[in-house]
Amino acid sequence: ITAIIMKKYDNIKRKTLIERAGETIVRDPAAQARLQVSELDKTAIRSEIKRKACTDQIIKDEKEIKAIDDQIALLKSRYDPLCQHLQELKDQRNQLMKTLETSSEQEKQIMTNIKGIAHERTMSDFKLTRSFASLELQLQRGFAMDPSTTFHQKGYKPELPPYYTVRLRSKLPA
């Protein structure tokens, strides 16, 4: 609607009070001059009031901007060290994560080695116990039960390490 109204009045030029006064016929030119001067005075006073209000508002806005800038500077002075501390904490956390990863990997390797060693020790202990038991039985029987020795049972005495001979002597009746 406003576009239609604007089109309707596009050809009409806006005129000032003085221009309109020049187009009309005035009966009393002195009264007309006084009216024009009073209108100009009113316009000047309104302009002065508006200018003073704008100037006052500009001063208030500048003070507000300065106060906001001061608050920003204060907040920034507190914010920047916090950001720096946060970055240091992040770096420290990353370093600790790397250390934890390497420690965890080392722990896995150590546990794998320990597991292997424990298994080997268990197997060697089992074999050693089995061989000791076989030697004990061999000493008790007087012959070995190995497949290679079953054919030579008569008169066979195995050679025993000194440990078994000492144990054997201690078991013999005196």
Image: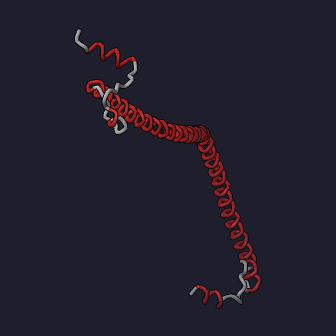
Residue toward you, 78 or 39: 78
Q: Quadrant of the C terminus?
A: top left
Q: Is residue 148 left or right of residue 99?
A: left
Q: Is residue 120 above or below residue 167?
A: below
Residue 164 x/y as whole percent: 35, 19
The residue sitting at the front extreme is 154
Residue 79 x/y as whole percent: 58, 41
Q: Quadrant of residue 3?
A: bottom right
Q: Is residue 32 left or right of residue 53?
A: right
Q: Quadrant of residue 76?
A: top right
Q: Is residue 51 left or right of residue 83?
A: right
Q: Is residue 74 visible?
A: no
Residue at image location 60% in from the left, 90% down from the top? 4
Q: Is residue 68 left or right of residue 167?
A: right
Residue 171 x/y as whole percent: 26, 15
The residue sitting at the top extreme is 174
